[in-house]
């Protein structure tokens, strides 16, 4: 049977994702548009349906979310940057602890070699870890399974945790403005579009892994701070972003055979469960000390994607700027230190003691 055209498979993914999101919305499940699209597309991908993610479209939606998150960086929020130092130290400890435990799990339970296990174990940095891992001689087929499974489980379980354990409502982004009078006017649309386009162009020029989110966020924060724009993005745009991003997560499982991905997936599930448990424990322990709400610290520590955790933060009206800042810090730390640390450890292990 001939392979469908790439455009058709992308459209099929979006149709499946939209259907899943609509059903989850109808069933009143938490964060329905992202979770519904992610679960429906991933199930179809594993079943052999020719779904596909289109990275340029996904990147455009990441830019949209960057502009959206930037609207939360008000002048009062920026005054809190100096007080987040303690949370950054907690994040550093979290990355060290969870990566160390995950390496052990991927080695023992996932039957991975040391190199593949290391690059599969970081709580973030999927793109850079896949590239750096392949360059270091790791199995490039297993690292995406580990990271995709981690992101999927985190995005799925965090909203359920808030609903069932914490008792926090996770709506379908209905807290965002929907009346026609609250939509951006033409001037604001032009300014916000300019932030997105300029941010996308700068990110492409600079080559930052998360620049497509970070730079539009900064530019958006500036225009909101100087009162050039006062209205957030309309809800339909945010819903479209959720469907595209959720579908992109699910489509990563295309072509993965259940037998071949069984052991690394089981190891990833165990490692992710431990990462989430440590995040919950750290949030409960350090939130009173740092004077930061427990839900905000948990979302900041949770080993999910920057865009996905920002969406959940917005949906429950949590401290979105704080959460986005800590995720950016984690991605930067993993991208900068992860490959370098591996080279250091490998060099140390290759050194033989003198007789």
Image (cartoon, rainbow, N blue to C red):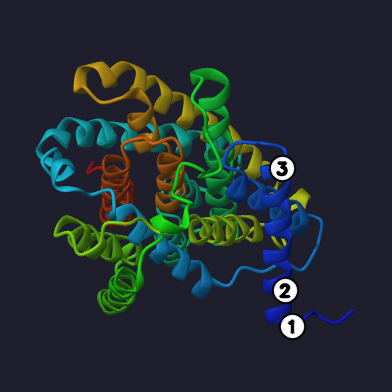
Contact between labelled residues 2 and 1, with CB atoms less than 8 Å apart: yes
Name the disc covering residue 26, or none: 3
Name the disc covering residue 107, or none: none
What's the distance in space between the residues labelled 2 and 3, CA to CA?
Answer: 26 Å
Q: Is residue 185 visible?
A: yes
Residue at the (22%, 58%) spot, across then down: 224
Answer few, some or many: residues within 10 Å of disc 2's Cα (few below 14, many 20 plus, some between 14 and 19). some
> Label 2's element?
helix
Tell me where residue 134 appears, x and y as whole percent: 47, 64
Residue at the (20%, 33%) spot, across then down: 89
Could you say which is closer to the camera, residue 140 or residue 227?
227
Answer few, some or many: residues within 10 Å of disc 1's Cα (few below 14, many 20 plus, some between 14 and 19). few
Tell me where residue 270 appears, x and y as whole percent: 58, 32
What's the distance in space between the residues labelled 1 and 3, CA to CA?
Answer: 32 Å
Task: Please give the residue where the numbered disc 2 appears in the rendered image.
Answer: 9
Could you say which is closer to the camera, residue 132 or residue 137?
132
Q: Is residue 112 visible?
A: no
Query: In this rendering, which labeled residue sits more in front, label 2 or label 3?
Result: 3
Could you say which is closer to the camera, residue 190 or residue 16?
190
Name the disc covering residue 5, or none: 1
Answer few, some or many: residues within 10 Å of disc 3's Cα (few below 14, many 20 plus, some between 14 and 19). few
The earlier-in-sequence mark between 2 and 3 is 2
Query: In this rendering, which labeled residue sits more in front, label 1 or label 3?
Result: 3
Residue at the (47%, 53%) spot, across then down: 179
The quadrant the N terminus occupies is: bottom right
Considering every residue shown, the one lying at the far right of the view is 1
Tell me where residue 12 appears, x and y as whole percent: 74, 69
């Amino acid at each position: 049977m001939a392979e469908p055209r790439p455009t058709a498979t992308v459209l099929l993914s979006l149709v499946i994702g939209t259907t899943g999101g609509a059903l989850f919305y109808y069933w009143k499940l938490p964060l329905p548009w992202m979770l519904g699209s992610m679960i429906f597309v991933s199930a179809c991908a594993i079943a052999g349906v020719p779904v596909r993610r289109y990275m340029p479209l996904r990147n455009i939606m990441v830019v949209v979310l960057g502009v959206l998150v930037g609207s939360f960086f008000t002048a009062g929020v920026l005054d809190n940057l100096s007080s987040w130092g303690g949370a950054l130290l907690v994040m550093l400890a979290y990355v060290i602890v969870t990566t160390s435990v995950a390496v052990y799990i991927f080695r023992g339970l996932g039957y991975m070699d040391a190199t593949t296990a290391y690059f599969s174990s970081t709580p973030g940095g999927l793109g850079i870890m896949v590239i750096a891992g392949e360059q270091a001689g790791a199995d490039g087929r297993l690292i995406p399974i580990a990271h995709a499974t981690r992101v999927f489980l985190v995005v799925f379980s965090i909203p359920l945790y808030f609903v069932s354990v914490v008792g926090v409502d996770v709506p379908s982004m209905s807290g965002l403005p929907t009346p026609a009078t609250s939509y951006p006017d033409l001037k604001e649309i032009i300014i916000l579009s300019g932030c997105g386009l300029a941010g996308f162009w700068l990110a492409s020029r600079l080559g930052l892994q998360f620049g497509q989110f970070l730079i539009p966020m900064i530019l958006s924060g500036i225009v909101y701070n100087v009162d050039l724009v006062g209205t957030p993005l309309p809800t339909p745009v945010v819903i479209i972003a959720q469907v595209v991003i959720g579908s992109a997560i699910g489509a990563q499982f295309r072509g993965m055979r259940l037998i071949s991905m069984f052991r690394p997936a089981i190891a990833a599930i165990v490692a992710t469960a431990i990462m989430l448990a440590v995040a919950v424990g750290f949030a409960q322990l350090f939130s009173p000390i740092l004077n930061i709400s427990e839900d905000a610290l948990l979302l900041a520590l949770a080993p999910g994607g920057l865009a996905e955790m920002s969406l959940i933060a917005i949906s429950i009206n949590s401290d979105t700027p704080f959460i986005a800042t800590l995720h950016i810090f984690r991605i930067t730390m993993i991208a900068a230190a992860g490959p370098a640390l591996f080279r250091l450890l490998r060099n140390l292990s290759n050194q033989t003691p003198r007789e």
